[in-house]
Amino acid sequence: MEELLRDCSCGKLQLPDFQRSWVWDEERIKGLLASISQAFPIGALMTLEMKAGAAETFARRPIQGALPAAEARVPDALLLDGQQRMTSLYQTCLRDEVVETITPRQRLVRRWFYIDIQKALDPGSDRGEAICGIPEDRKVKHNFDRDVVLDLSEPDFEYVHLMFPLHKVFDTFKWMQGFVNYWNRKGDPTKWDLFSAFKEGVLDNFKSYHVPVIALGHDTSHEAVCLVFEKVNTGGKALDAF
């Protein structure tokens, strides 16, 4: 999965321009993250290979939030099915920036996504409850924003509340080192055992996750591509003659 996300980041894997924009809401993102954290299947992707040096068949664009250089790159493949999943994962797990998404009531929000370490390790807890969307300032507030009930604005605060930032999931070493040093200073080295169990039982599922990919050859006809896209994207925008 990590390789696919990095391909999206650099523009090696892009979208045909007839794809709709990224529209997943916060709850669907949490559900996706919960599934991967448990190594549950999330369905296959479908791509269309691009022939090197050939004229481009479809207008294209990088996924939302890709590196600036991605737009100028000719992709190796176009993502026909899986944009919502790949963009959600790229935005939350690889891109070190706040995620712009929407609530189920269609309100625009900006969120950082975290995993509650203790809840994730609790066999009696629903994994979805361990995935948290935190406001842009990394503070959860109640009473009309007057009371801060959870502050994750500094790494030390993340450590003390046992909240792991998902955008560090593919680059955990520095955060893990800070976590261990913090709890050693506090005289509680047993927290390393807790994090080790979390890493093995949760984080490693992200790093080892494999997404099946159905790859259509570059010689697939335009008609076949459009038919496939129409069948697998029932929620997408209608296709016109172009």
Image (spheres, grey):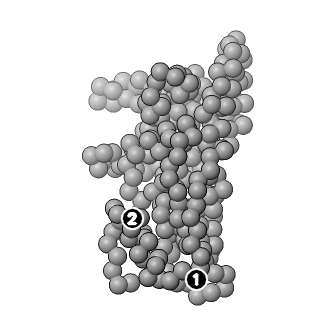
Q: CA distance from mark 1 to mark 2?
A: 21 Å
Q: Which residue is mark 2?
A: 233
Measuring from the top left, give residue 23's x and y in whole percent: 38, 56
Q: Which mark is residue 168?
A: none
Instruction: Answer few, some or many: residues within 10 Å of disc 2's Cα (few below 14, many 20 plus, some between 14 and 19).
Output: some
User: Residue 8: which quarter of the image?
Assistant: bottom right
**Is 47 on the left or on the right of 239, as rendered?**
right
Measuring from the top left, give residue 4's x and y in whole percent: 62, 58
Residue at 29% in and 30% down: 144
- Nearer to me, 33 or 187: 33
Measuring from the top left, give residue 215's x and y in whole percent: 58, 68
Residue lying furthest left: 105
**Is 168 on the left or on the right of 17, as rendered?**
right
Whether tag 1 and tag 2 are in contact, CB under 8 A, the answer is no
Q: Amino acid at mark 1?
A: Asp
Q: Which residue is mark 1?
A: 219
Measuring from the top left, give residue 109's x and y in whole percent: 37, 46
Quadrant where the image shows the C terminus: bottom left
